[in-house]
Structure formats: C-alpha cells, structure tokens
Amino acid sequence: MEVNPSVPAKTVSEFIAYAKANPGKVNMASAGIGSVHHVAGELFKFMTGVDMVHVPYRGTTPALTDLLAGQAQVMFDVTPTSTPHIRAGKLRALAVTTATRADVLPEIPIMGDFVPGYEASAWLGFGAPKDTPAAIIGMLNREVNAGLADPAIKTRIADLGGTVLAISPAEFGKLITDETEKWAKVVKFANIKPE
C-alpha cells in the first residue's frame, strides 16, 4: 500500500483516519477492474470501513503514473513496480500486504499489524490441461521446483520482491481453492462485475 507524498498519512492508521475524514475524496488507482490492485484495495475498504473511489486504469503503468502525479492518492501495487519509486522517495509505502515483511523493503510493516487478518498477495504458478497424466504433472513439478531452487533464480525473484513457493501440485491446488474462496467474498462485497 503506497500513497502519493501529498497525502499527510505516514502510517496505515493515519491513512484510515484521513480517509474516514475525507469520505469519497480519496482516489484509489488500480490496473483495472478485478485486478490484484483493485481487489486488494476492496479488501482494505471492507475490513476498515473507509470510503475510497476506485479509479480503474488500463494497466499498472498509467495507474502508477497518475499516482506519482497526485491524480490518485493511494494504490495497492505489486512490489516490483513500486519499489524503485518508493526508494526514490516519489511514493510513500505504508505497508506491505503480505503476511510477512518483504525482504526487498524490510523497514515497511505488514498491513496485518494495523488491520488484523489482512493479507493480499499476487502469485504466479504453472498449470496444465485437466487430463494431463499424473506422471507428467509430477515431472513438471519436480523440474519447476528444481529451477526455483537455483540460487540465481531465487536471488532474482527476491530482488523483485517475490518469494518462491516450491510446493506440490496438491498444495498448489489447495492454494487456488483457498484464494478463490477468499477473493469471491471480496468481489461480492464490492459488487465487481466483468467489463
């Protein structure tokens, strides 16, 4: 969660107070309706009761551009695109939305410290067609996990603010199921419709 430096809040608690004192006047930029940026912001609104105006853009770059310009006040962005602007002082990070601090921004607290139970992460994974034989799935999983164990790959992912999850196909299936249930509730709360 990052804000334009013109926003007076220096912490998540201060931001919540600021947003509640200015209902409907805080613009929340996102990369589009239903994007990770959007639903992370909607989860924040749901859990804190703040009233922010969602401003969807056609991608991260225009959303971030308007946040930097002060047209939007807050964005729930992914770490790789925000980190350079945070380090340059062009944006102020209030919290990371993951369950643990980010190695790339260790001084930034987690959102859960301010909003208990809040967690939002973007993740990527590999999938295969439904009828792919178990032996092929197992081989693909072993090879992908071996690649993720490579120190150069782990370091590059960490430099971008990511965390490697070298998990089994069953664990990945559970992650997908759990995340689908969690975000379905947020989509319903926010009444998000496909474009």
Image: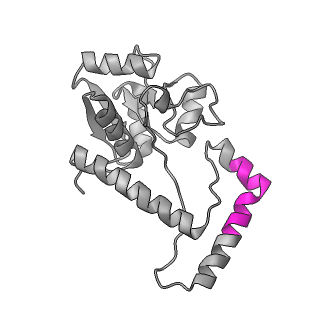
Q: Quadrant of the N terminus?
A: top left
Range drawn in magenta? 143-156
Side of 119 relative to 163 (left or right): left
| Location of residue 121 with respect to 90 vertically, above or below | below
Judging depth in this view, the residue of 109 and 147 nearest the camera is 109
Q: Please, which residue is most extreme toward the right here?
A: 151
Q: Is the magenta stretch mostly helix, strand or loop?
A: helix
Residue 178 highlighted magenta (yes or no)? no
| Location of residue 85 with respect to 141 vertically, above or below | above
Side of 166 relative to 189 (left or right): right
Q: In which quarter of the image is the C terminus?
A: bottom left
| Location of residue 92 with respect to 105 vertically, above or below | above
Task: Quadrant for residue 87, please give it.
Answer: top right
User: In the rendering, at what x and y percent does residue 53 appear?
Assistant: 25, 32
At 24% across and 44% down in the image, what residue appears? 190
User: In the rendering, at what x and y percent does residue 112 appear?
Assistant: 47, 32
Question: In the rendered picture of this protein, how many numbered marks are placed on residues?
Answer: 0
Residue 108 visible to the viewer = yes
Judging depth in this view, the residue of 153 and 149 nearest the camera is 149
Colouring scheme, one of rainbow, by chain, secondary structure, one colour: one colour
At 58% across and 34% down in the image, what residue appears? 83
User: In the rendering, at what x and y percent does residue 106 appear?
Assistant: 64, 30
Task: Quadrant for residue 49, please give it.
Answer: top left
